[in-house]
Image (tube, helix red, strand yellow):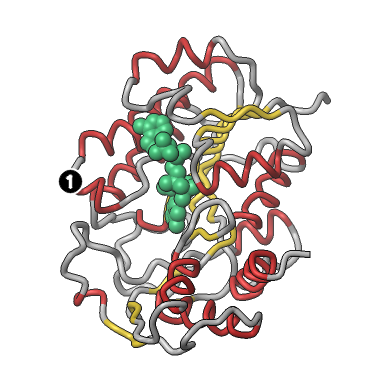
């Protein structure tokens, strides 16, 4: 069977960039950003896609800031649900496979230690509601599509929580982070490896799949882990201690956030075989590459 041609959407995003770098080494890969395909111009999507040959479409584009989505719900709906539906319809019509990225924010975050793929979804903000609408629309329009839910991404292509806490610790020893919000930090590099396997070894896997590292963390424990690793790498942070605070104290946030959204990766582990590593090990590898590149 010939190697599939890949089209990645979200070329300027953290995950999209990582996917391009990883997959272009294995497949004929094209990446488009907003300039090539604007999700807020839904009427242009079908014709644009029809003019480009591909076998697998990876949609890592979307409106990803919960606060921006909360104040611009119409734009969020276009980017996170309307455009993905059109993409899925196009994929279905041409027999291409769609892999669409979604989020742990589809869950309520209430009274649950671990969320499985089949669990009830009750998002608490516009971002989560539009992403959930996108999931449903994609799976309905293209039964062969795979919706990959990810959480708390980090990696070299876009600064995220560990990068910003280390940056702040270079300047001050007075740091705080939310301790009552729990999920799973996940390495973009690890996601790239899983997606490669899903393309090569599991071309017919479809439906919902949680793609996250193992273990759990709060924003607070994730921050302290990043600082401890950085200090061990002789990054001159002024402290490795972070003051724990409650999410409710962040009154400037426009969108409510779900508190407990740890996703089970058991389905992914059994599909791909082998153990999925803990987020801490992936974070350590990322920070070693960042601060002590060979
Ligand atoms: N980051 C996380 O912690 C996290 C957690 C859970 C789920 N996810 C999901 O994972 C996926 C990738 O996230 P990410 O962190 O890589 O996102 P990101 O860095 O914010 O990148 C989003 C991408 O989407 C593009 N985009 C936004 N609006 C668009 C529009 N109207 N038309 C076309 N492109 C548009 C952006 O282009 P511009 O650069 O032009 O804005 C960018 O390329 C998303 O589906 C997200 O919901 C992320």
Q: Residue at x 55, y 82 (%)?
A: 236
Outermost residue toward the right in this view: 1
Image height of 107 relative to 181, above or below: above
Q: How many labels does the image show?
A: 1
Mark 1 CB in 8 Å range of ligand 1? no
Query: Quick check: can you spot residue 131?
Result: yes
Location of the N terminus by quadrant is top right
**Along the viewing direction, whichever of 253 and 210 lies nearer the viewer:** 253
Q: In this view, does 286 lie above or below 120?
A: below
| Element on which disc 1 rests | helix
User: Which quarter shows the C terminus?
Assistant: bottom right
> With respect to residue 182, does 134 lie above or below?
above
Please state if 176 lies on the left or on the right of 222 as rendered: left
* Image quarter for ligand 1: top left
> In terms of depth relative to the viewer, which is nearer, 205 or 283?
283
The residue under the point 48% across, 22% down is: 36
Where's residue 273, x and y in %?
A: 75, 59
Left/right of residue 74 with respect to residue 28 in the rendered view: left
**Rendering coords of residue 140 (x, y %):** 42, 31
| Residue 118 visible to the viewer | no
- In depth, the one of 138 and 66 nearer the eye is 66
> Residue at 17% across / 65% down in the picture?
252
Mark 1, Cα crowd under 10 Å, few <14 / some 14-19 / many 20+, is: few
Give the image quarter of residue 30. Answer: top right
Residue 165 rendering spot, x and y as whole percentages:
44, 73
Q: Position of residue 213 (x, y in %)?
A: 59, 65
Identify residue for label 1.
71
- Residue shown at the point (25%, 46%) measured from the top left: 69
Tell whether 43 sits left or right of 93. left
């Amino acid at each position: 069977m010939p190697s599939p041609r890949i089209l990645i959407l979200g070329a300027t995003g953290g995950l999209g960039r990582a996917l391009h770098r990883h997959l272009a080494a294995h497949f004929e890969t094209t990446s488009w950003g907003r300039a090539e395909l604007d999700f807020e111009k839904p009427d242009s999507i079908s014709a644009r896609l029809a003019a480009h040959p591909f076998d697998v479409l990876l949609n890592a584009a979307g409106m990803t800031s919960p606060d921006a989505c909360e104040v611009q719900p119409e734009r969020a709906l276009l980017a996170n649900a309307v455009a993905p539906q059109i993409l899925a319809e196009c994929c279905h019509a041409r027999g291409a496979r769609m892999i669409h990225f979604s989020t742990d924010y589809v869950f309520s975050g209430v009274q649950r230690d671990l969320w499985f793929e089949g669990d009830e979804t009750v998002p608490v903000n516009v971002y989560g509601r539009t992403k959930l609408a996108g999931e449903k629309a994609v799976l309905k329009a293209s039964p062969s599509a795979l919706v990959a839910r990810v959480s708390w991404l980090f990696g070299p292509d876009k600064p995220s929580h560990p990068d910003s806490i280390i940056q702040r610790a270079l300047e001050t020893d007075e740091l705080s982070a939310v301790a009552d919000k729990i999920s799973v930090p996940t390495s973009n590099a690890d996601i790239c490896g899983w997606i490669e396997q899903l393309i090569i070894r599991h071309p017919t896997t479809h439906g919902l799949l949680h793609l996250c590292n193992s273990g759990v963390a709060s924003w607070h424990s994730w921050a302290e882990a990043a600082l401890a690793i950085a200090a061990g790498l002789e990054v001159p942070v002024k402290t490795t201690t972070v003051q724990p605070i409650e999410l409710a104290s962040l009154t400037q946030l426009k969108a409510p956030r779900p508190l407990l959204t740890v996703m089970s990766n058991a389905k992914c582990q059994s599909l791909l075989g082998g153990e999925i590593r803990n987020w801490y090990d992936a974070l350590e590898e990322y920070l070693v590459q960042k601060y002590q590149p060979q």
